[in-house]
Structures are given as structure tokens and as C-alpha cells.
Amino acid sequence: GWGVVIYSSVAKGGNFARDNCGTNGTGEVVAYNVAAGTYTSTISQADADQKAQNDVNTNGQAYVNANGSCTWTSQAQSGNFTRNNCGTNGTGSTVTYTITAGTYSSTVSLADANQKAVNDVNTNGQTYVNANAGCTWTNQAQSGNFTRNNCASGGTGGTMTYNVGAGIYSSTTSLAD
């Protein structure tokens, strides 16, 4: 009698990128492999090999989504800071300090990557603004005594005080200016 021929599949595999990481997430690329001999066929070698390929096609992505890792990059984060070192009669400008998207990454979560960016804003924003934003100073009250000097011959001019109130003039150079 005739015996039955059994064909064993060859090894099959494919690389799949995890695709369920969500916003700003990049999935790890992982290989999904089916070992040689996992599938058999009494029809043909091609049939046994197709069974192995079908396993890769059907299960590879799900395997990677369950077992691969994700890396998330931060979204842009910013805060408004007002320069607070202008000194007497100085008012600092308000500037937005921004950490651009993608500056930080995390293998934990998007929230973790974003928190790293928020921490940067909170730690460095005021220092940056104090070093880079402008100041506007307003004058302090000023006064001077002046004696009239254009009286007719033989006349003596009177003396008066001339006052300039505080906050009338401003400068972006200095209080002294």
C-alpha cells in the first residue's frame, strides 16, 4: 500500500510595529515567528507553509500590540512668566516660556512625557524670563527750585519749586534714564 506523505512547514515570520500606543506614541517593532514544523499538511509543502504564513498574518499584530513597548513624546507645554527682578519702579514684561513638542520622551505614558515638559517649564521659566524679558521703569517724583532770571534791570526774581509727579515718564533702559 501507499503511505501518506506529511509535509512540515518551514519557519515563517514578520516584523510588526505596535500600533496601539495612542497620541504621540511610537510602537516598538517586534518579530513574530512561527517555528519550522509547527504546521503540517497531507496536501503539499505549499499548503503547510501557507498555514504557517496565515498564523503570522493573523496573529503577528495582536502579539506585538500585547507584548511590544511604546515610547511617547511630549506635547508642547508653556507658561506665562513676568520678569520679577526689575528693581525699584520697574515693571517686568510677561513672556510665554515654551517647551516644544517632542522635547521629552517616556516609556511609561504620554502623561509622564508631558509632565517632564511641565516640570521644565516650572523649573526654568522664571529664570529664563528674568534673563531675557524687558523691564519698564517709571520715574520717581522729582522737584527742583528755580529762581526767575529774566527780571528787568534792578529786579530780583523769586524762587519756586517745580515738581514732576511720580510715574509721568518711563524708560526701557533704566530707572536713572
Image (cartoon, rainbow, N blue to C red):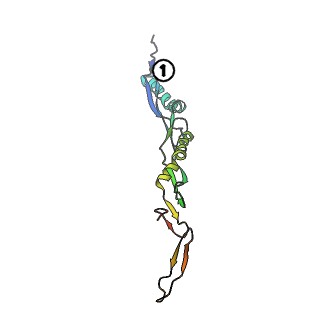
Above/below status of 39 relative to 174: above
Name which residue type carries label 1: Thr
Residue in the image at 44% along x and 19% along y = 7
Q: Please say whether residue 98 is visible from this viewpoint.
A: yes
What is the x, y in percent for residue 79?
55, 51
What is the x, y in percent for residue 10?
42, 22
Give the SS element for disc 1.
loop
Q: Please say whether residue 76 is visible from this viewpoint.
A: no
Q: Residue furthest top?
A: 1
User: Which quadrant of the structure image shows residue 119?
Assistant: top right
40 or 86, which lies in front?
86
Above/below status of 30 relative to 114: above
13 or 108, which lies in front?
108
Residue in the image at 46% along x and 54% along y = 132
Q: Which quadrant of the rendered structure holds the N terminus?
A: top left
Q: Residue furthest front?
A: 154
145 or 23, which lies in front?
145
* Numbered disc total: 1
Above/below status of 146 relative to 172: below
164 or 84, which lies in front?
164
What is the x, y in percent for residue 20?
54, 38
What is the x, y in percent for residue 168?
54, 70
Disc 1: which residue: 38
Q: For label 1, count other residues whose C-alpha is less than 10 Å away and answer few (under 14), some (14-19) or many (20+).
A: some
